[in-house]
Image (cartoon, helix red, strand yellow):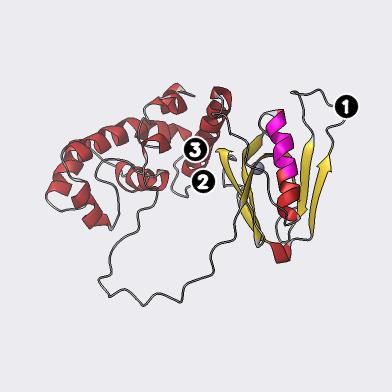
């Protein structure tokens, strides 16, 4: 798996910390058998959104995704190339928007090199934002014009046929996701430091494979009040729980721990 190959030490993370192995990142626990509350009166239909592709530059690199423009709000998802660490996605209600300035800096730019269509936004309490229309230059220009149309309440031209995200962008997105996961791991208050973490990877992978293989995930969930998926598609947070709360314990041994769980005891 490409995302795990950045360092050899982390290669064993295989499905431990890989979102490629996740399906539903946060399955809702279904604990309540209470009857469904009566639904509220039908809400007004959501305002139609115009989707444009933008990138957000940082001190180091950039994140990239889609901006969704409607009469009520402007929102951003850094879904193409996520920011390292916490998401840079945001939502700004139109009533809070203090500045929405579209800047055409395309004059004199080499076509296909730097297109130069920008959006500068101010929406407290968000930091001031400067976004550049991204993707193929012709599409960036079209998205710039579509944004103008959407903001002016005019008919919006059709969305460009988005090409398949390039392998290069995909790889950058994978790296960004990988960094995000590492961030989630290392910012966990239980993170024991790099050396100790490396030592925990192999037994954690072994423990996990055997838990799944011997169908002991359910028993583990009952013992710890967790909600780990039986098929091993765990979120980083969930894998952290297993690693830091069980495998990192002094005297942990895979087989002993599995035997304890099979006997409904915490290892
Ligand atoms: Zn960003």
Q: Does the magenta run of residues contain 104?
A: no
Badge 1 crowding class, 10 Å Cα cut-off, few under 14, some 14 to 19, many 20 or more, is few
| Left or right: where 229 falls relative to 178 | left
Which numbered disc flags the more N-terminal residue, 1 or 2? 1
Which numbered disc flags the more N-terminal residue, 3 or 2? 3
Check disc 2 and report the residue beneath it.
187
Q: Which mark is residue 182?
A: 3
Element type where label 2 sits in the image: loop
Between 265 and 120, the residue placed more toward the observer is: 120
Check disc 1 and report the residue beneath it.
108
The number of numbered badges drawn on the structure is 3
Q: Name the quarter where the N terminus is drawn.
A: top left
State the CA–CA distance, disc 1 to disc 2: 45 Å
Q: Position of residue 121 (x, y in %)?
A: 76, 52
Element type where label 1 sits in the image: loop
Between 36 and 144, the residue placed more toward the observer is: 144
Q: Is residue 46 above or below residue 239?
A: below
Please tell me whether the stretch drawn in magenta is mainly helix, strand or loop. Answer: helix
Residue drawn at the location 51% of the way across and 46% of the way down: 187
Magenta region: 138-145
Which numbered disc flags the more N-terminal residue, 1 or 3? 1
Residue drawn at the location 35% of the way across and 76% of the way down: 37
Residue drawn at the location 62% of the way across and 47% of the way down: 88
């Amino acid at each position: 798996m490409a995302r795990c190959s950045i360092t050899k030490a982390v290669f064993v993370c295989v499905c431990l910390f890989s979102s490629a192995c996740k399906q539903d990142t946060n399955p809702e626990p279904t604990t309540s058998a209470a009857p469904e509350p009566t639904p509220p009166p039908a809400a007004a239909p959501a305002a139609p959104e115009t989707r444009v592709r933008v990138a957000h530059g940082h001190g180091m690199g950039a994140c990239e995704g889609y901006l969704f423009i409607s009469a009520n709000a402007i929102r951003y998802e850094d879904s193409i190339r996520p920011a390292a660490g916490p998401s840079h996605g945001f939502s700004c209600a139109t009533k809070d928007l203090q500045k929405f300035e579209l800047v055409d800096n395309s004059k004199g730019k080499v076509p296909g090199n730097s297109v130069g269509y920008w959006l500068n936004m101010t929406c407290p309490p968000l930091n001031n934002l400067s976004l550049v229309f991204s993707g193929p230059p012709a599409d960036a220009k079209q998205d710039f014009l579509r944004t103008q149309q959407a903001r002016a309440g005019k008919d919006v031209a059709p969305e460009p046929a988005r090409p398949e995200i390039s392998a290069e962008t995909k790889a950058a997105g994978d790296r960004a996701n990988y960094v995000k996961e590492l961030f989630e791991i290392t910012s966990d208050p239980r993170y024991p430091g790099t050396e100790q973490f490396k030592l925990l990877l192999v037994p954690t992978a072994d423990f996990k494979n055997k838990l799944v293989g011997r169908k002991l995930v359910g028993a583990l969930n009952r013992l710890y009040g967790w909600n780990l998926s039986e098929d091993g598609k765990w979120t980083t947070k969930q894998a952290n729980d297993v690693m830091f709360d069980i495998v990192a314990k002094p005297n942990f041994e895979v087989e002993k721990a599995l035997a304890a769980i099979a006997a409904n005891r915490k290892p």
